[in-house]
Amino acid sequence: MFEHVVLIKVKEEFTPDRQEEAVKKSLAFKEQIPGIVSLSAGINVLKGTEHGQGFALAIRVTFEDEQACRDYNVHPAHLSFLQELKPFIEDILVADYPF
């Protein structure tokens, strides 16, 4: 198994409605992209605290293996999602690891 964790800090103009839509689109990856074992995504309810450090969105994807994660990174659904979000991203943190 291979884990992919993403934290996204968005610009102010990325409204709560847009954040909800981004969460829905990322959750759809499970049906669109092969190799995903489980996926969760959500809006960080503590983003305004020291604990949340301003990161508004979180996505966690568990893949069958590292290659499935690599395939996900270049999948058209994922690339389209990134292009759509790109103008609104202030910062992004990604961690990938086997377990």
Image: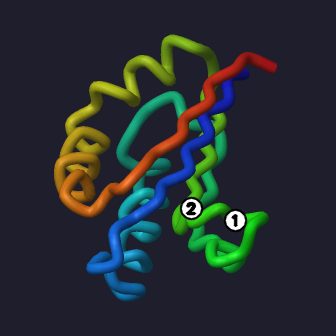
Q: Which residue is mark 2?
A: 55
Q: Amino acid at mark 1?
A: Gly
Please say if the residues under marks 1 and 2 sit with CB atoms less than 8 Å apart: yes
The front one of 35 and 6 is: 6
Q: Residues within 10 Å of mark 2 (few under 14, many from 20)?
A: many
| Placement of the C terminus among the 4 image quadrants | top right
Q: Residues within 10 Å of mark 1 (few under 14, many from 20)?
A: some
Residue 59 on image: x %, y %: 57, 52
Residue 74, image quadrant: top left
The front one of 34 and 99 is: 99
State whether residue 61 is above or below residue 14: above
Q: How many marks?
A: 2
Q: Residue at x 40, y 75 (%)?
A: 19
SS state under label 1: loop
Q: Which residue is mark 1?
A: 52
Residue 80 on image: x %, y %: 19, 47
State whether residue 89 is above or below residue 77: below
Separation of residues labelled 1 and 2 (CA atoms): 6 Å
Residue 85, image quadrant: bottom left
State whether residue 30 is above or below residue 20: above
| Placement of the N terminus among the 4 image quadrants | top right
Q: Residue at x 50, y 12 (%)?
A: 67
Residue 49, image quadrant: bottom right
State whether residue 79 is above or below residue 30: above
Q: Residue at x 47, y 59 (%)?
A: 9
Residue 5: numbered disc: none
Q: Amino acid at mark 2?
A: Phe
The front one of 85 and 80 is: 85
